[in-house]
Image (cartoon, rainbow, N blue to C red):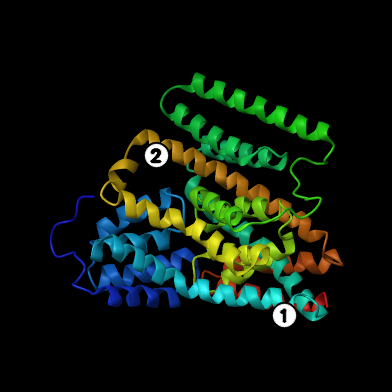
Amino acid sequence: MTEPSGDHRPPTIGYGALFGRFLGFGCLAFGGPVAQIAMIRHALVDRDGWISPAHFNRLLAVMQVLPGPEAHELCVHLGIRAKGRLGGLLAGFGFMLPGLVLMMGLAWAYVRFGMADPAIAAAFLGVQVAVIAVILRAVHRIGQHILQDRLLGALAVAAGAATLVGVGFWLVLAATGVVYALARSARPRLAGLVAVLAAGAAAVSVLLVVESGVGWPGAIVPAQAQSVSVLALFVAGLKAGLLTFGGAYAAIPYVRADTVGRGWMNDGQFLDGVALAGVLPAPLVIFCTFAGYVAGGPWGALAITAGVFLPAFAFSMIFYERLEAVLDVPGLQQLLAGVAAGVVGLIAATTLQLAFATAGRVPTPWPALILFGAALGLVYGWKSPLAVAVVVILAAIVGAVVFG
């Protein structure tokens, strides 16, 4: 990567001080990626001049195209800028460490004490209802940034529909990426052919599932828990880390398919993990640590976390000098834009599936609908980094009272 001219360079700093600086960012990383990026920008761009504002904006645009949590990737990149590859490793690890430690502790308590107390179970049920509203708001926000034209919107809808009928996400994302890239490269006929072939493959996939007699193809209802290994959890995390286009919420479909879909946990536990991640100072994708702990204990939690964050480290560590140049290729940008549109559809479909699963667990529908509506109104109307945390806490209180 070409370095900017002028005085916009990190100051001389030791490895220990660099780690401590980003550990401090991690301790204050509340409110999701927007708040985290704003904090990093204020400290390292506006105040300390590690990088020029224009270069930071370009770098942020690149990170938003790449899979993985943008704030964490920025920390790795800026750490490399200050102290080379080892600096990037220390910066990224420092930023994620507080959330990792806190989530490990919460996951231990969750597994250790369980839902034996009816009041605790009712509180978490209220949280699960509210988290559906939080994810729905995130889908809307992500879609606003990604779905920039009608074709991208149509691809998102098609991806969501395909996911609901059980088409594998590999086929969905490959098709949306290729179709959009071909359409934007003045090859509409070839794009249409790929779309038709993908639709045919999807139809065959659905028919095979229906013929097998396992029920509605889009549902995730494992007959029994499958065995879980540390390697399997690492691979599940790596898959999520490589495919989280559009932010951490994009990891939800993949992690859910690999954990709930294999019987390692249920949808209620999965939503509890997403809720806990929303109140911690960490990238939201730290919910994967919770899923790994429930499925495979402490080593399982560390394995899935390593898989999720590995791409966020690797892209900058390996491609630091070429990152912006590579992603400046128009064809690659269009391919990734199509994939990102497909991810929006995946998240929307998964949100609908989670909503139906949660509806089956509430004792009475009307209180749940009112709670859902109130949570949705709050996350839409209150533009604060604390909104998600407040929604989760209030939903726990309401759930304990209403469902207890």
Residue 53 falls in which quadrant of the image?
Answer: bottom left
Depth check: 1 or 292 in front?
A: 292
Image quarter (top left, top right, bottom left or bottom right) of the C terminus: bottom right
Can residue 385 be seen by looking at this rendering? no
Dot 2 lies on which element? helix
Residue 275 falls in which quadrant of the image?
Answer: bottom right
Residue 39 lies, in percent from the top left, at 38, 71
In this rendering, position of residue 134 left or right of residue 340: right
> Along the polypeptide, which appears first: circle 1 or circle 2?
2
In this rendering, position of residue 183 left or right of residue 61: right
Identify the disc placed on residue 397.
1
Depth check: 359 or 23 in front?
A: 23
Residue 344 lies, in percent from the top left, at 57, 47
Identify the disc placed on residue 216.
none
Residue 188 lies, in percent from the top left, at 49, 22
Question: Is 182 situated above or below 129?
Answer: above
Residue drawn at point x = 61 percent, y = 50 percent: 254
Rounded to the nearest angstrom, the CA distance separating label 1 from label 2 is 45 Å
The furthest residue to the right: 363
Judge the density around disc 2: few (<14), some (14-19), many (≥20) Cα neighbours within 10 Å: some
Can residue 101 be seen by looking at this rendering? yes
Dot 1 lies on which element? helix
In this rendering, position of residue 332 left or right of residue 242: left
Residue pointed to by mark 2: 333
Q: Amino acid at mark 2?
A: Gln
Residue 96 lies, in percent from the top left, at 45, 69
Residue drawn at point x = 58 percent, y = 62 percent: 288
Q: Amino acid at mark 1?
A: Ile
